[in-house]
Amino acid sequence: MSSTVVIGAGIIGLSTAYYLSDHQPPSTIHLVESSPELFSSASGYAGGFLAKDWFKSQLLSLGALSFELHKKLAAAHSGREKWHYSPTTSFNYAPSRQDGGQKRGDDWLRHGTSRAQAAPTEPEVTDGDDAKDLAAAPSWLRRIPGDHIELTSTEETTAQLDPLLLCRFLLEECRKRGVKLHHPATVTSVSADLRGELSSVRIVDAGSGAETDLPCTRVIIAAGAWSGRVFRELFRLSDLEIPVGSLAGHSVVVRSPRWKGEEGERCHAVYTTHGKGFSPEMYARVGGEIYLAGLNLGVMPLPRVTGKAPVVGEDMERVRETADMLLGDDLEIVREGLCFRPVTPWGVPIIERITDEHLGPGMGTRAGADGGVYVVTGHGPWGIALSLGTGLVVAEWAQGRPLSADVSGLGLKMT
């Protein structure tokens, strides 16, 4: 049985290891994470919004699969209690008190629009179940006469969760099964056997500096915004560039006296505009927390060390001011954060097995399911939503099993 090294223990790497362990001895799976703190970037600081059909055509199959996997996992493992999974009603909100016009800033989905505009168009509703959904618009949102709110989706097609708690659950499950975590550690090199095929990787423990060679025939790079850098440093003779960049974004988690998140309360997602030029996104979670984000900094350089980055004071202040304006000035701040989401120039993820010719001279892999180098990154704002589907498909591909979703439109254009 081929051993597999997964580089990156964020939501994509964990999902891949989780589904790999369904069909191969877990002791042959190694997760390597270099960040000093687990889940300290997008996997821990994202909003956790899930959608079934808010995607570009290349992602519709994967999105539907992942949405159902999230629902299934939550049903099987008490997801509401463990990682605050909840079906969600989503709204688009236009406040009348805009102080700078209706300009939208860069959002998490594409330049110049809000994520809500990715939602399927809903007809105007005046009666029936959808009208009841609209009437149940969030009471925690600070609204005044003249504001406009419209329903964008119901609990049938959107949901949400706390990504930090889901990551912790997946890691615990992987470790209970026998998957090995190396943290904090860095993969520094790859080696080939006498046939020129991938046979091992060398990792260095960040604490002790000890070096260990892990025999493996498969490497899966799932290091988020750092994936291109990891590939380049491991395969120095390769002519291939992994075109993944980063989109930095601030967020704040608060508690409001108007939201308890208790059993029987409906969870909401709200998308709106802001006169200062960005598009806030708000998620009222199980347990009483409200997540607000949307201020993105596309020009912020990616830190050399993976993981947590300090917030930018003036930008974080803008996010706090927005929270006060939209949610009230009596909020308790639970957590502030800055994370880097991996993005591609064409706006959809990369899920690809790298052909041997692009690994560089003297390096190849075993054929079929016995080997391979995979790059899985670039999920942008949809990393949590697509995580389980991506993990399952990558595991199936690596193990030579039929794929549960069509990812043929998510490859690299290698020539």
Image (spheres, grey):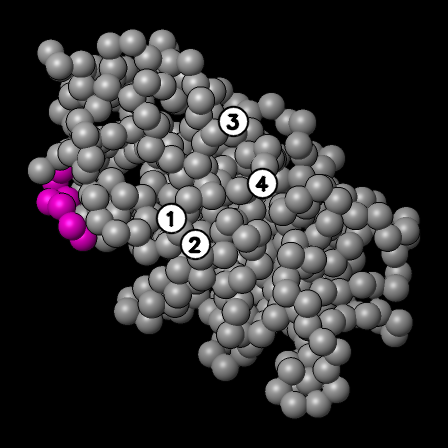
Q: Is 284 placed above or below 254 here?
A: below
Three-letter code, disc 1: Thr
Q: Earlier in the sequence, mark 4 or mark 2?
A: 2
Residue 207 seen in the figure: no
Q: Earlier in the sequence, mark 3 or mark 4?
A: 3
- Determine which of the numbered discs, if any, sits on residue 62 in the image: 2
Segment tinted magenta in the rendering: 22-28
Residue 61 seen in the figure: yes
Taking the spot 67% from the left edge, 59% from the top edge, the residue there is 116
Q: Is 60 placed above or below 21 here?
A: below
- Determine which of the numbered discs, if any, sits on residue 347 in the image: 4
CA distance for labels 4 and 1: 16 Å
Label 3: state its secondary structure: loop
Q: Is 218 placed above or below 408 here?
A: above
The residue identified by callout 1 is 390
Three-letter code, disc 2: Leu
- Determine which of the numbered discs, if any, sits on residue 231 in the image: none
Three-letter code, disc 3: Pro
CA distance for labels 2 and 1: 7 Å
The residue identified by callout 3 is 243
Taking the spot 70% from the left edge, 90% from the top edge, the residue there is 127
Q: Is residue 27 magenta?
A: yes
CA distance for labels 2 and 3: 21 Å
266 relative position to 281: left or right: left
Q: Earlier in the sequence, mark 3 or mark 1?
A: 3
Q: Which residue is at the front of the view, 412 or 103?
A: 412
